[in-house]
Amino acid sequence: MTYAETIVFRIKTICNARGLSYYKLSEMSGVNLSTIDNIIRGETKNPRIMTLHKIAIALNMTLSEFLDFKEFNEFSFED
């Protein structure tokens, strides 16, 4: 799994668990729907930290909480 794929996995997992559409996440976070869509479709390979922070806050999480999940914690940038 690539870095981008781990971020997509995290967003999809949380949205599915909470019954949130990407449109609703966009509204809640203030991140353009096109930006979220580009992340989900894998066109954005390295989302900006500010974007991830806005998404995390919209999900009522800190950025640290948002990034603290098994797949990301096991990711190696050396590969």
Image (cartoon, rainbow, N blue to C red):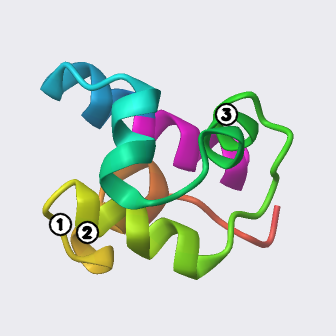
Is 44 above or below relative to 8? below
Q: CA distance from mark 2 to mark 1?
A: 5 Å
Question: Secondary structure of the magenta portion, mostly?
Answer: helix
Residue 7, magenta (yes or no): yes
At 55% from the left edge and 69% from the top edge, which residue is drawn?
A: 51
Read off the magenta span: 1-11
Q: Amino acid at mark 2?
A: Ile
| Coordinates of residue 36 in the picture (x, y in percent) | 60, 43
Earlier residue among tags 2 and 3: 3
| Coordinates of residue 73 in the picture (x, y in percent) | 41, 64
Instruction: Report which residue position mark 3 lands on.
Output: 37
Instruction: From the image, state whether disc 1 or disc 3 is nearer to you.
Output: 3
Quarter placement of the C terminus:
bottom right
Mark 1 falls on what kind of element? loop
Mark 3 falls on what kind of element? helix
Q: CA distance from mark 1 to mark 3?
A: 21 Å
At 27% from the left edge and 36% from the top edge, which residue is drawn?
A: 14
Instruction: Report which residue position mark 2 lands on.
Output: 57
Q: CA distance from mark 2 to mark 3?
A: 18 Å
Q: Is residue 45 left or right of residue 49?
A: right
Instruction: Report which residue position mark 1 lands on.
Output: 61
Residue 34: which quarter of the image? Answer: top right
Q: Amino acid at mark 1?
A: Met
Q: Is residue 74 left or right of residue 65?
A: right
At 61% from the left edge and 50% from the top edge, which residue is drawn?
A: 32
Give the label on residue 36, or none: none
Is 23 above or below relative to 44? above
Is there a contact, CB below 8 Å, between mark 2 and mark 3? no
Is 3 above or below relative to 51? above
Q: Amino acid at mark 3?
A: Asp
Quarter placement of the N terminus:
top right
Is there a contact, CB below 8 Å, between mark 2 and mark 1? yes
